[in-house]
Amino acid sequence: MPRTAETASFKFNHTMIRVKDPQASLKFYQDVLGMELYDKHEFSDFTLYFLAYNHEGQELTLDEKRSTRFGREGILELTHNHGTESDPNFQGYASGNSDPGRGFGHIAITVDDVNKACERFEHLGVPFKKRLSDGKMKYIAFILDPDGYWVEILSNSLELNRT
Amino acid sequence: MPRTAETASFKFNHTMIRVKDPQASLKFYQDVLGMELYDKHEFSDFTLYFLAYNHEGQELTLDEKRSTRFGREGILELTHNHGTESDPNFQGYASGNSDPGRGFGHIAITVDDVNKACERFEHLGVPFKKRLSDGKMKYIAFILDPDGYWVEILSNSLELNRT
């Protein structure tokens, strides 16, 4: 069914996950995965961070990034409820991959060289849920973000994902 | 921090959620939200559906969609574990927004006219978690997908999201 005029403007703008410690999460999504901060909103009891890949081929100011934030896809929103990062009683968030709490599964990053990407993650000390060598699907890996959310790493090549 | 060569190819390709009944979910994401099926993989005990918005301005064959599936952002992967749709003991999936299972929050769709989009959802009988008129943030709404996952609806205009 082709798109109708009623939904012609629609875009899958973002996915939101809650994080315990924004400093750990920003380090992971920026330094390990290469995303950039596109926007930030501070409220009295929580702060929202919007991260995305910059595909423009040039550095952008935060204002330039903000101006494109609603008209594009591929944004990751991190919600930080203030205090969780230092609360000894905070239980942590559910990854969505075990009961109770099963539902959400993962986010996925496509890359041009899965082997090289995974070697770099190993070098950086990133924990893996599934290495390329584990299981049947040798062409995908899963790494874990600081809250334990699964991040799939797979090739951006159709052919490599068919083998 | 600008992107380095090591992450220059990275894209936030997809977000995966589990669904109880793919017929209900496909109807929702295709007919209500206007996404299209970009790929489908059937395994013995589960099936994966990949949905996305077609921004090409023309109809694409499934092969054409598949060929772009790994090189773009904004893909939604639905995982159907066979049998859940007709299992009277299946408890349903967690939305991620209440304990236990709190973590994932929502996906979000940006649209050119939030009021018109919400009027259409009302007309189609889509359940709302938050209508535009509810709460403080009058410029965003949340609708519920067939599994109870929250789908935020907001404007694609920077200005409207600052008011």
Image (tube, coloured by chain):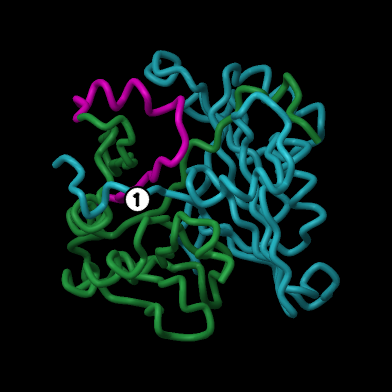
Chain colours: A cyan, B green
Q: Which quadrant holds residue B20?
A: bottom left
Picture layout, residue B44 above or below residue B97: above
Q: Which quadrant holds residue B52?
A: top left
- Please say whether residue A48 is one of the residues in the magenta stretch: no
The local crowd at label 1, few if under 14, some if 14 to 19, many if 20 or more residues have their Cα within 10 Å, is many
Instruction: Please report the residue visible at 27 percent of the width from the left and 35 percent of the height from the top.
Output: B40
Instruction: Please report the residue visible at 32 percent of the width from the left and 57 percent of the height from the top.
Output: B19
Q: Which residues are magenta?
A: B59-82
What x and y, as percent, mark residue A45? 73, 79
What x and y, as percent, mark residue B126? 24, 71
Q: Which residue is mark 1?
A: A10
Observer-nearest of B14 and A45? A45
Instruction: Please report the residue visible at 73 percent of the width from the left and 29 percent of the height from the top.
Output: B3
- Please say whether residue B81 is one of the residues in the magenta stretch: yes
Q: Secondary structure at mark 1?
A: loop
Instruction: Please report the residue visible at 56 percent of the width from the left and 71 percent of the height from the top.
Output: B163
Total residue callouts: 1
In the displayed structure image, the side of residue B139 where residue A1 appears, left or right: left
What x and y, as percent, mark residue B21? 23, 58
Observer-nearest of B4 and A39? A39
In the displayed structure image, the side of residue B64 where residue A126 appears, left or right: right
Q: Residue furthest front?
A: B159
Observer-nearest of A59 and A111? A59
Picture layout, residue A163 above or below residue A4: above
Which chain letter goes with mark 1? A
Where the N terminus of chain B falls, by quadrant? top right
Name the amino acid type tagged 1.
Answer: Phe
In the displayed structure image, the side of residue A1 where residue A63 appears, left or right: right
